[in-house]
Amino acid sequence: MTGPGALQPLGETLNQRQKMLVVSALMVSMFVGAIDQTVVSTAMPRIVAELGGFGLLSWVFTSYMLSSTVVVPLVGKLSDTFGRKWFILGGIAVFQVGSLACGAAPNIESLIAFRALQGIGGGAIMASVFATIGDLFPPAERGKYMGMFTGTFSLASILGPTVGGLITDNIGWRWVFYVNIPIGLVAIPAVWFNLPARRLPGKVKIDWIGAFLLSAASVLFLLALVWAGDKYAWGSREIVGLVAASAALLAAFIFQEIRHESPMVPLHLFRNRVFLLSNLTVFMIGMGMFGSIAYLPTFVQTALGASATASGVVTTPQSLGLLVASVIGGQVISRTGRYRWQTILGSALFFIAMALLTTLDVGMPRWHVSAFMVVLGAGIGLVMPTQSLVIQNAVPYQYLGVSSSAGQFFRQIGGVFGTAIFGTILANSYHASFDDHMPPAAQQAMPAPILAKFDDPMLQLDPRTFAVVRQQVLALPGGETTFNAAAEAQKKAVADAVTHIFTFATVVAGVCLVVTFFIPELPLRRQIGAGGPPGAPPGSSPPPEI
């Protein structure tokens, strides 16, 4: 049971009907943040066409990612102290305000700023929702609910592109953001009336200095990863400076956590083998999946000649595989109480999917790619929700919010890390391969400024720029032959580069598979508030909250 100074777990104060009402409210809340990402991606060509600023396009997503990643560990710790309700409600409210502002954005710069505001709200929602599941159900029952919530996220990913396309084509891209408002208006009263407000008794000291140091270190490190290989070279003074400053802030954060009586992130948790290896697994999955899949649309649209809509259809089966696997996997864990072999199986499917994706080539049938994505989705669906449960089960109940947010934090950091590394692989591999596949006669026939346009592997993802380049080449003597040669060379170069990306991702997946064999299988607790400090047997009482 809970120790002195701690609250009785929420799930022990509610009946089953009340729990289901809270679960429904949480699922609506998660759907608000989850569907936004895929809806917005579909509308981006129209947004850029109206607001301009194609060069800043990536920041529409990056600003959201930065703010949501930074806020996750902070909300995780604070919600352990002050309860989840107000952070979920606050997250939805901030997300709503951000959505309204995004819909009214007069230019791309303001849209980027408002997306950062949205990210704060989205991060608060995600950090609180999974911890609240832990408040409601013991680990032995929690698996099926983790699967349901992961399935909700997957459903949003499936519906998002279609909904976004319909709204953009028939109403306008601004309504892609406004559509969040009615969903939020349902979620706010659902949470308000069904989720009790709770906080620890007495005065609790908050480590605000640690919060600032962690936030600053995270922002600088994420900026280094985003800019490396794109705006600046990896070894440039700017990137090295950002990484060094991040490392210095991280060292100061660790020193602060060691000396503070109520640290933002209790460092002793990392002595827990399950906690450490599970977060490492989540990091590698995020790195391998998000980092590599980010460039799959480039292959589908360039090497296979598919439209943006068609590329979405090709990759959507990943969400279908994830949806089915997460729901089934959650049920299996709840029924058997075992998770080790499910984690290993999921990691093996993750490895197999990455290995299959190394076979991508020009002219490959699109359904092959879709089939590979089903395997990938199934693997992720078996691992990700399982690891969330494993991490929560391995630590005392008083650290539920911290542990839940840690998994999300490392997954998102892994995704950014992978995207940066794989982006560099894409650029370097593409340039060398394009030179190999481009006939010398075609290179000589094309003026250097026009030829330089083909140095961008994502040229065809910007239809307006690509159309201008095409007209410039066709206007040259023998322009049609030259253009066909350049387009074919670009297709082959993109295919080669993406193959290199997935080869590296396969190595990451292989390491991830090996790590899962070393994660101990602890018995899933059948009491919500049970659990001891790292190294203590499951079921012992946690130390009191300071």
Image (spheres, rainbow, N blue to C red):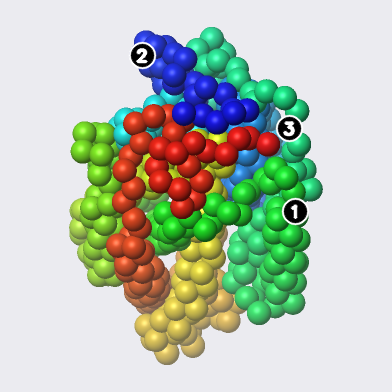
Specify few, some or many for label 1: CA neighbours under 10 Å numbering under 14, 14-19, or 20 or more: few
Residue 259 is tagged as: 1
Q: Is residue 473 above or below residue 541?
A: below
**Residue, disc 3:** 204
Q: Between residue 215 and residue 272, name the one nearer to us.
A: 272
Q: CA distance from mark 1 to mark 2?
A: 42 Å
Sequence-wise, the earlier of marks 1 and 2 is: 2
Judging from the image, what secondary structure is the residue with disc 1 in? helix
Which residue is pictured at 62% across the width and 69% down the height?
228
Q: Amino acid at mark 1?
A: Arg
Which residue is pictured at 52% across the width and 58% down the height?
271
Specify few, some or many for label 3: CA neighbours under 10 Å numbering under 14, 14-19, or 20 or more: few
User: How many numbered tags mark residues here?
Assistant: 3
Is residue 280 in sight in this rendering? yes
**Residue, disc 2:** 16
Sequence-wise, the earlier of marks 3 and 2 is: 2
